[in-house]
Amino acid sequence: MPRHVYTLLVGSERRERISEPGSLAFLDDGDTVFHTITLKAGGGFGRLRQVIGLLPRLRRAALVVTTEYIVAWSVGLMFWLTRAPARHVVVGLNISGRPIQPRRRWMRRLANLAFRRVDLAIVASRPEARIFHALHDIPMRRFAFALWSFDLPSAEGSAFARPARPYFCLIGRNNRDHATFCKALEGLEADGVIVASAPPAFDPPPNVRVLTNISFADCIDCIRGSVANVILVNDANRGAGHITIVTAMHCGRPQIISDVDTASDYFIEGEHVLTVPLADPAACRAAMAGLLADPARADRMGAASEAYALRWLTHDRRLQRLEEIQRAWWTDGRFDPIDPDWAAERDAPRQL
């Protein structure tokens, strides 16, 4: 009988395919079938229903890998209720909406039993391990950290029309502080571009353009033409902005980023990025003004960012890191929670 491994993604429509093993190549013994199933995005109950429909297959799997918060909770819940023998790995626990935190303590404990059914959780920043441990009681020994990384695709075919004046961009859908961005641009001889899934809940000033749901190629071209990419978040209670941070570094542009520890693993302050306090328009305006006044510095920061991205933030590097973690965990249950090579270069602790 073949061994089955499932990876569950979330996308615009449901799809299923037999896939390459990728970072699970160590399980490819010639008699293992790797399935990738994309669940249709929608409300949380919709994702739960889809997982319930797959349960007879998932229970018999050797391993199930989930990549999204609600799907991870749904699989954990079904596995806990049915005492499924399959092992469960989560690669990414980013919260795009509200965390699963019922008001009543007994209900929170019940909900967290599903997360306790996660055997290995690979998060995109070191602080996220502590956040999810506190939120959902996942033991710290089950967490590992792997930088979110990818190879920048081509921006060919971009239809983005760059502003005539120097501009700053704020791109992303999760936890973004549009109000501070707009206030920071007041009085500057510069424009702003906001790219989001929906317009802000207020009228932006005349020098800020708002775009919704544009293509990734357009986002790349927008970042490349900017003075700097800006990532301002509302709070430090969740990971946010990693994809945009990595994209901007590959694009060779400096960044202005909220000073939150969930982002700090991705850059070196002052060399690649200027950080500003949360909800501080004056500090953000000062950072913007400094880069406007010194384009050569902005370009130096961008070049240093691109070199760093090519060293640590590529698809191959992430694939290698994910395989190292999962192979060690599968083989003997022990793994390096932090990449020792990255930690040595950053002079960072090797424990979460």
Image (cartoon, helix red, strand yellow):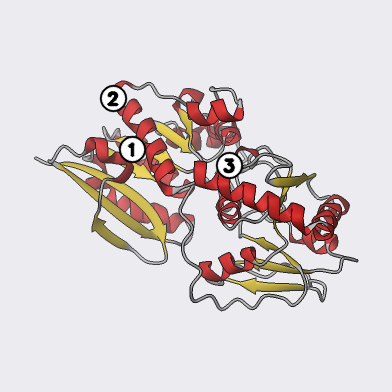
Structural distance between the alpha carbons of marks 1 and 3: 20 Å
- Mark drawn on residue 331: 2
Q: Residues within 10 Å of mark 3 (few under 14, many from 20)?
A: few
Question: Residue at point 41% right, 57% down?
Answer: 10
Q: In percent of the image, x 27 and y 59: which residue is there?
A: 16
Percent x, y for residue 202? 78, 69
Of the residues tagged 3 and 2, which is closer to the observer?
2
Residue 102, which numbered label? Answer: 3
Give the total of numbered labels.
3
Badge 2 amino acid: Thr
Q: Nearer the viewer, mark 2 or mark 1?
A: 2
Question: Whole-Å distance between the Cαs marked 2 and 1?
Answer: 22 Å
Identify the mark at residue 201; answer none if there is no mark. Answer: none
**Element at badge 3?**
loop
Q: Circle 2 — which element?
A: helix
Q: Nearer the viewer, residue 347 or 139?
A: 347
| Residue 79's disc number | 1
Pair 1/3: label in front? 1
Q: CA distance from mark 3 to mark 2?
A: 36 Å
In the rendered structure, are the residues bearing label 2 and label 1 in contact, judged by CB atoms less than 8 Å apart? no
Q: Secondary structure at mark 1?
A: helix
Q: Position of residue 31 (x, y in %)?
A: 12, 41
